[in-house]
Amino acid sequence: MAAAANNGGEGGDGFDVIVVGAGIMGSCAAYAASTRGGARVLLLDPFDLLHHRGSSHGKSRTIRATYPPAQ
């Protein structure tokens, strides 16, 4: 895996946010940053789509709950 991010300043070709890990949590973070904040996002993952090493697969499955701030 190789990727380059050019933080070229205003009008550059860079990214505002780089998320490492395209599992469920990383994908949600990248989606939220791009849709809610309008950030230019680069999402990186070393594995192919639907690989067996993710935190959402098999007996090693991880379940996390996230809660919005209290209002």
Image (spheres, rainbow, N blue to C red):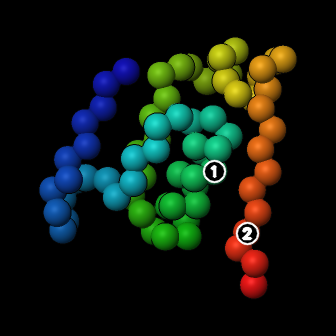
View extreme (right): residue: 59
Q: Is residue 19 left or right of residue 22?
A: left
Quadrant of image for the C terminus: bottom right
In this rendering, would 3 be left or right of 21? left
User: Mark 1 highlights which residue?
Assistant: 28
For label 2, the residue is 68
Dots 1, 2 in contact, CB < 8 A: no
Specify whether 9 is left or right of 21.
left
Q: Residue type at mark 2?
A: Pro
Q: Quadrant of residue 69?
A: bottom right
40, above or below 71, in the image: above
Look at the numbered disc 2 and give the secondary structure of its residue. loop
> What amino acid is labelled 1 in the image?
Cys
Cα separation, mark 1 vs mark 2, equals: 14 Å
Q: Where in the figure is residue 33, as x and y percent of width and height? A: 51, 61
Q: Is residue 8 above or below residue 51?
A: below
Figure check: 59 above or below 10: above
Q: Nearer the viewer, residue 11 or 71?
A: 71
| Image spot of residue 42 (x, y percent) | 41, 45
Q: Please tell me how crowded label 1 is: few (under 14), some (14-19), or many (20+) other residues with Cα within 10 Å.
A: few
